Image: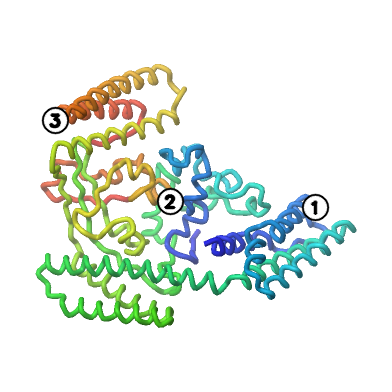
Amino acid sequence: MKHRTLAGRFVAAAATVVICAGAAATGLGAADPNSFNRLLASPSERNAPPTLDGIHDPQNPGTALLQSPKAAFELLPKSPGGNYVNWVKAVQEDKIQPRYDRLDANAKPIPLDMNIVREVKGSMPDVVYPHKQHTEWLDCANCHPSLFVPKKGANPISMAEILLGQKCGVCHGKVAFPVTECARCHSLPKQKKDQQAVAPAGK
Amino acid sequence: MDTRRTLLCLLGAAWVLFPPALPAQEVDRAALLLQVDFVHKLIEESSAAKQVEEAGIPEAAELRATARELYEQAQQELKAEALPAAKALLDSATKKMFEAVRAAGKDEVVAEKRGVDFDNRLASLDALVKALGEISKEKGKDSAALLAQLAEQRASAVSLRTSGDLGKARTVLDGAYQQTRQSIEELRRGDTLVRSLNFASKKEEYAYELDRNDTHRMLLEVLSKERSGEDKGLEEMVQKLVATANEKRSQAEHEASMQRFENGIALLEEATTQLIRALRLSGTYIPG
């Protein structure tokens, strides 16, 4: 099954997962809109059909006609967490072809092959942020400068922020794998750093 | 924004309201009654209806009036149990209402969206051009001519926008943006940048540890909620570790309140270690 999207880079996922923070805030387990994890449904609640997802209006007669995420994701590469789809692999294996430009169907992405390693304290492996996997789908302008200023030292990031849906948490935990998948970002063990054996994360 | 939301809602609803036509005998009465209710709300109570009212545009008002008439006819057909005819009229009423909304604010919506898009793209261009300048300096590459050209394109785009030619302005802006993106890609290809962790003071490091502790608490809260009741023995062990973590955290906060941040850091590290153990015990893989 191949998904062709019409309006931007997230749309293959967005048809069935959260695209509207405002709407999602009123969704599952969202008694307090500012509570932690308000946008990350528990495993049993993930990929719920549109009538039960807390996003769509179950009273609307059209809601029941929408495709269920489970059906949409069935043939996509699997992931153990999040919405159980490995989106990076899905793009790389050409299972989905996100349209790169709303106005130009033939526009191609310009992937940036650059990793950023962020040191963290303790024995926790350092974070590797791979631009390549992100820019195969996203445009620079999706993140810069509104989420991250493209300048050294200009982006202090705390895990608490991410968990509350800011910075990386704008996508991770909503449409991309959740932060409970620690090792996918914290992928550079301390002893390997000196050897410059930087493994790209996100796979 | 209301206009845009309204249109998006309408567009989203459009395809589900007009599914492939069923054979006459297969019109579902229950579904039709729901549609009657939906169309009534759309015409009389929805944000779309309010928008048409507030716009005060005769063409939009006329289209809404037509939608109303079609709706009334549909009601008559329904009373006569002519379900396919009622459905067709309801579909037409919905279409008319969509037309009314478009007539009430299409230009405004499109202009607003294009303006916002232009501003966002301009902000991205500025950020990337600044980054390009810094990367060029770092790499010892002379990009003065390119930067000057990009500045010229930017100025041209802004000038075009000011004069009202937003379409052309966007084209010029996009050209500069693409060139900047390409240049950064060429300069940065294959790079690995390391962002070291350096604290200016013990107070700053304490704040970092506090955040780390909060993070693990949050994770535990969610994961224990997921697994609560699964294994009582395990739950007790987890709670014991959490209690120790809480105690250490309180001590850390006390130390910090006395400006003894070094002690506070050590205590927070111990507290977080307890939480990590609790998380691992709960079955979450925490690397390190």
Name the secondary structure under disc 1: helix
Name the secondary structure under disc 2: loop
Residue A46: x percent and y percent? 49, 42
Instruction: Mark 1 vs mark 3: give the one in front.
Output: 3
Question: Relative to the observer, which residue lies in front, B85 or A148?
Answer: A148
Counting residues from the start of the chain, the first of labels 1 and 3 encountered is 1
C-alpha gap between disc 1 and disc 3 = 73 Å
What residue appears at the point 53 percent right and 47 percent down from the top-left corner?
A: A70
What residue appears at the point 47 percent right and 55 percent down from the top-left corner?
A: A13
Could one spot residue A74 in this view of the protein?
Answer: no
Residue B184: x percent and y percent? 23, 68
Letter of the chain that mark 3 sits on in the rendering: B
Residue beneath disc 2 = A175
Numbered badge on residue A2: none
C-alpha gap between disc 2 and disc 3 = 39 Å
Instruction: Mark 2 vs mark 3: give the one in front.
Output: 3
What residue appears at the point 78 percent right and 63 percent down from the top-left corner?
A: B71
Numbered badge on residue B262: 3
Residue type at mark 3 is: Glu
Letter of the chain that mark 2 sits on in the rendering: A
Could one spot residue A114 in this view of the protein?
Answer: yes
* In the rendered image, residues at marks 1 and 3 fall on the same chain: yes
Residue beneath disc 1 = B29
